[in-house]
Image (tube, rainbow, N blue to C red):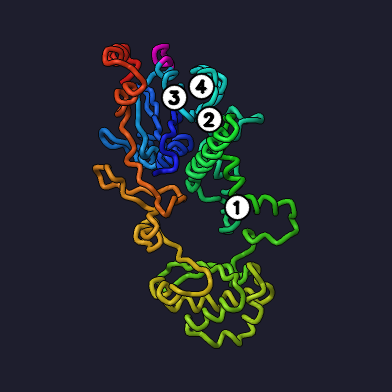
């Protein structure tokens, strides 16, 4: 049985991070009902102009997997009455709207708790729930990637002034963080009968990911691996180009045994007595006086073979290493396939595959099904909470549902 089977979630969130949290909960077995305005669907459905006829963008499909969808105008009195009945039977209310919008729609914490005092209220924002920028919107690229320090860290690591853009993807991490917090809140409610308000943010998520780096920034005179030129970082934690212009990342932190094993696999046993490598096992990420010479020697060695040849030679190596893979290669990665990290969507007509949330239960990643079309389950969901066919017809004529 999925771990969240029987948990009901009302998902009134837009864009990616909020809906993504609902998608994770659905993946784990919750019944997640996604609410969209009949005439104004979630913008991510058509982001980048990638919407398909009757369908949605790949981003929407990723973040909204396994949900049921209703088209409901919650700003209308009749629509709010419908929302109230959904909230009454829900365990979780999920939103990404800022305070003014929540107050206008009467979906703020006090409004929802007045309907269902035991509900877990969960929200995701850009900058967090307090502070002077709490009511400013936030997007992945600006808030997570740039304001959160990741862009600057990446630029320094790459030795460039202009940080790379469009690499944020903090929405997915913030979504997973919020989903985890919701699970903890559900456990607290079960144990204490008290349901907390759960907050996640793009900024807080970025800072959590960079926690060690941020802590180290208190000590500006200490060595900072990210800002040290590659040739001076030492050979233990470094990246090397192969004969076919691909790259291999070494993270050899296991001591001398890692290197003795590597020398044999590389067919360079003479390096065991090479003075450039005399202290390699003890220098850590920073290479010391011989680091640059050792890195230069390894540059020549890795250039002797292609990435595929190194894959074979290092497949059972003692030290930790990884090829720098393309997204396409992940579909055929042996660990990806063995663990089901990329799953075919069972009822998707286009044969779509999606990445599963990175938690397995009994080694099963789960398969919740495809993302819904807008309003696909409106009648089904409203019948379940007691609305008659006559009421559904009237609401549809009023434009409250679709």
Comes first in the chain, label 4 or label 3? 3
Spatial distance from mark 2 to mark 1, Cα to Cα?
36 Å
Spatial distance from mark 3 to mark 1, Cα to Cα?
45 Å
The 10 Å Cα crowd at callout 4, few under 14, some 14 to 19, many 20 or more, is some
Residue, disc 2: 120
- Is residue 329 shown to the viewer in this render? no
Residue, disc 1: 153
Of the pair 84 and 77, the residue shown nearer to us = 84
Question: Which x, y percent locates residue 277?
Answer: 62, 80
Q: Secondary structure at mark 2?
A: strand
Of the pair 307 and 369, the residue shown nearer to us = 369
Q: Secondary structure at mark 4?
A: loop
Magenta region, main secondary structure: helix
Spatial distance from mark 2 to mark 4, Cα to Cα?
9 Å
Question: Which x, y percent locates residue 230?
Answer: 59, 66
Left or right of residue 270, residue 57 in this image: left
Q: Would you place residue 23 above or below residue 233 in this image?
A: above
Residue, disc 4: 116
Magenta-drawn stretch contains 263: no
Residue numbers of the magenta segment: 75-81
Comes first in the chain, label 2 or label 1? 2
Q: Would you place residue 268 above or below residue 24 in this image?
A: below
- Residue 401, by quadrant, is top left
């Amino acid at each position: 049985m999925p771990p969240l089977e029987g948990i009901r979630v009302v998902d009134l969130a837009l864009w990616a991070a909020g809906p993504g949290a609902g998608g994770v909960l659905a993946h784990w077995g919750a019944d997640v009902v996604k609410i969209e305005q009949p005439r104004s669907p979630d913008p991510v459905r058509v982001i980048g102009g990638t919407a398909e006829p009757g369908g949605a963008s790949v981003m929407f499909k990723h973040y909204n997997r396994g949900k049921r969808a209703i088209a409901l105008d919650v700003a209308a009195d009749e629509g709010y009455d419908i929302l109230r009945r959904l909230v009454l039977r829900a365990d979780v209310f999920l939103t990404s709207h800022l305070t003014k919008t929540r107050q206008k729609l009467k979906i703020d914490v006090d409004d929802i708790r007045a309907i269902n005092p035991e509900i877990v209220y969960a929200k995701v924002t850009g900058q967090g729930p307090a502070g002077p920028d709490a009511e400013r919107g936030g997007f992945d690229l600006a808030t997570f990637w740039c304001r959160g320090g990741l862009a600057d860290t990446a630029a320094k690591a790459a030795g460039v002034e202009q940080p790379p853009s469009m690499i944020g993807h903090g929405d997915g991490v913030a979504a997973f963080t919020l989903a985890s917090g919701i699970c903890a809140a559900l456990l607290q409610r079960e144990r204490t009968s008290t349901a907390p308000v759960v907050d996640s943010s793009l900024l807080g998520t970025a800072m959590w990911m960079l926690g060690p780096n941020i802590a180290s920034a208190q000590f500006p005179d200490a060595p900072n691996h990210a800002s040290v030129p590659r040739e001076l970082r030492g050979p233990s934690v470094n990246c090397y180009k192969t004969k076919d212009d691909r790259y291999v990342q070494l993270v050899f932190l296991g001591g001398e045994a890692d290197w003795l094993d590597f020398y044999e696999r590389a067919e360079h046993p003479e390096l065991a007595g090479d003075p450039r490598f005399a202290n390699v096992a003890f220098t850590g990420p920073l290479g010391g006086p011989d680091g640059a010479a050792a890195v230069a020697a390894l540059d020549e060695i890795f250039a002797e073979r292609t990435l595929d040849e190194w894959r074979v030679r290092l497949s059972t190596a003692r030290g930790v290493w990884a090829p720098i893979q393309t997204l396409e290669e992940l579909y055929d990665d042996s660990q990806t396939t063995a663990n089901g990290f990329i799953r075919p969507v069972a009822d998707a007509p286009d044969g779509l595959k999606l990445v599963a949330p990175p938690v397995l239960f009994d080694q099963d990643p789960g398969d919740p099904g495809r993302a819904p079309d807008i309003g696909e389950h409106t009648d089904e969901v409203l019948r379940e909470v007691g609305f008659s066919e006559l009421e559904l017809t009237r609401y549809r004529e009023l434009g409250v549902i679709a």
